Image (cartoon, helix red, strand yellow):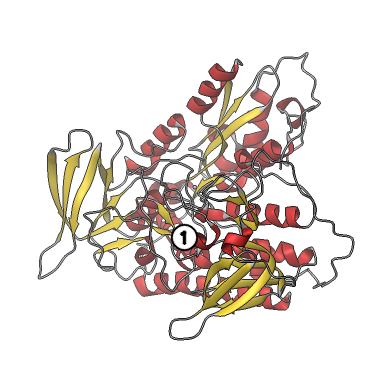
Amino acid sequence: MHSSFSLSLSQHITVPRSNHAFDSIPFAPSKPINLRFCGLRRETLGFSSLSRSHSRQGLQLHTTTTSKGISASLADNGSPPKSFDYDLIIIGAGVGGHGAALHAVEKGLKTAIIEGDVVGGTCVNRGCVPSKALLAVSGRMRELQSEHHMKALGLQVSAAGYDRQGVADHANNLASKIRNNLTNSLKALGVDILMGVGAVLGPQKVKYGKAGFPDKIVTAKDIIIATGSVPFVPKGIEVDGKTVITSDHALKLEFVPDWIVIVGSGYIGLEFSDVYTALGSEVTFVEALDQLMPGFDPEIGKLAQRVLINPRKIDYHAGVFASKITSAKDGKPVTIELIDAKTKEHKDTLEVDAALIATGRAPFTNGLGLENINVVTQRGFVPVDDRMRVIDADGNLVPHLYCIGDANGKMMLAHAASAQGISVVEQVTGRDHVLNHLSIPAACFTHPEISMVGLTEPQAREKGETEGFEVSVAKTSFKANTKALAENEGEGLAKLIYRPDTGEILGVHIFGLHAADLIHEASNAIALGTRIQDIKFAVHAHPTLSEVLDELFKSAKVEAHVSSQVSEPIAV
């Protein structure tokens, strides 16, 4: 799933840790979002190209100068061990922890990963993997149900139907397959998987264990926290897991309600509206802000609403809170009380078959033992610097301790967590590395898809006003693309936001067929510091959807006298 994208609520609560360790689902530094994405590496699909090496010869640890001093209070929190069980211990075996572990092995580090629930975390078990299985079904159902679309292609199809349990099994089987492949890839590479709830006991020291059994203690030169997040449920909402549910429950598809309210119109809400309406449900969105899809570029959001919401069995209430939701019981329906988001006056009461709470994610960080190293969370998030190094309550860096993914709140995307983990491994093996979060893409897997990287147009114009540069916009339509027209999928738009004086790409937003795949040319250009005047000479195969981006870059007007050389260093 998701970049500062906002949903119906803008605050988080601290969620107690239970006997689980989760990993990343999309989010923003300041606002909860509905976002589910996956950053699994090829080893997860059953391929392994790495060989295990225990040799660390030639590696020299590099210490980077920083404005924050390294914490000198080790004696207050216990003494670090003189020898270590591992070079690296990772707490949490989700996508972030998995990516860090694979890269650590590649770098020759003896690595262990601690998991308190199941390998794969939220993404594989309760997030991006099973949700994509459901969305694959909804996409095919939409195509088969569209008489106009089929007729345009010269096809005749009888009434399409589905087997609910078969659809649910498809999602569950996919999650099981990816989870097993991920587990096997870690074992094949020699990563020790330590089952139990992990916590930091002191400097370079971790304990883990299961309820009813004694804890075990292990040590490591470096430690990464990668415990992820859980669904955020606002006060006043009674979740029973059957009629009032979170995304965790919805992915099981235990029933398809006739009428379901989705609280929050971000990524999770949008994707589930795509699934439920394709399977025959009526959907009502409840959004606290004055417009739907508030986290998207406004122009893209307006087009998406016209295509994804208005023609479907979807209505919405914007500018309202769901102040109280009561689950169905004793033959009574789910009741939802709506109040005005500004005045808090009662607006309406809905009686529906089910309600899905899609109000974002909350960090899963309680019980990590952070008090042992003088670390205080901020709204549940572990404070870190731009190198993912944990910062203690006095503003000092905690030696050899890092935090990645949803737990630090920088960018709550599974692939962002993996990238942060890889960046940390680079640092602990001697190469200073800073991840450029503006180059990390995001996508919403509706039909058609939405994707983006970098800044929205309002964000870019605000930055331009602050820093004193002009901002230009270029656009191209899918209706001008041969491949899209051949697929009878010409509805779509690509938008480029850039600096005309330098050719710097500030943001790219796409709505249309396979937008989630197309965005990576733009994200890689931002990551590598490639300017428009250079990328517009790239050659794209014809006829392909990639030509949408080709035409987009070619349509940009960059000042001719600007050199294409990038003088400043680019963090990737």
Q: Say left or right for 476 vs 324.
A: right
**Along the viewing direction, whichever of 568 and 314 lies nearer the viewer:** 568
Q: Amino acid at mark 1?
A: Thr
Residue 256 percent across, percent down from the top left: 29, 65
Snapshot quadrant of residue 188: bottom right
Residue that sits furthest to the right in the current view = 58
Check the image and name the residue furthest to the bottom. 213
Indicate the position of residue 428 as horizontal and vertical percent values: 74, 57
Vertical side of 355 occupied by 50: above or below: below
Q: Is residue 545 visible?
A: no
| 131 sits left or right of 59 in the view | left
Query: Residue 381 at x, y = what percent?
Result: 47, 52
Which residue is nearer to you in this view: 468 or 482? Answer: 468
Q: Which type of secondary structure does the marked residue at label 1 adopt?
A: loop
- The residue located at (45%, 49%) in the rendering is 446
Q: Is residue 39 above or below residue 303?
A: below
Q: Residues within 10 Å of mark 1 (few under 14, many from 20)?
A: many
Q: Nearer the viewer, residue 378 or 176?
A: 378
Which residue is identified by label 1?
365
Q: Where is the C terminus found, in terms of image quarters?
A: top right
Work out whether 555 lies above or below 355.
above
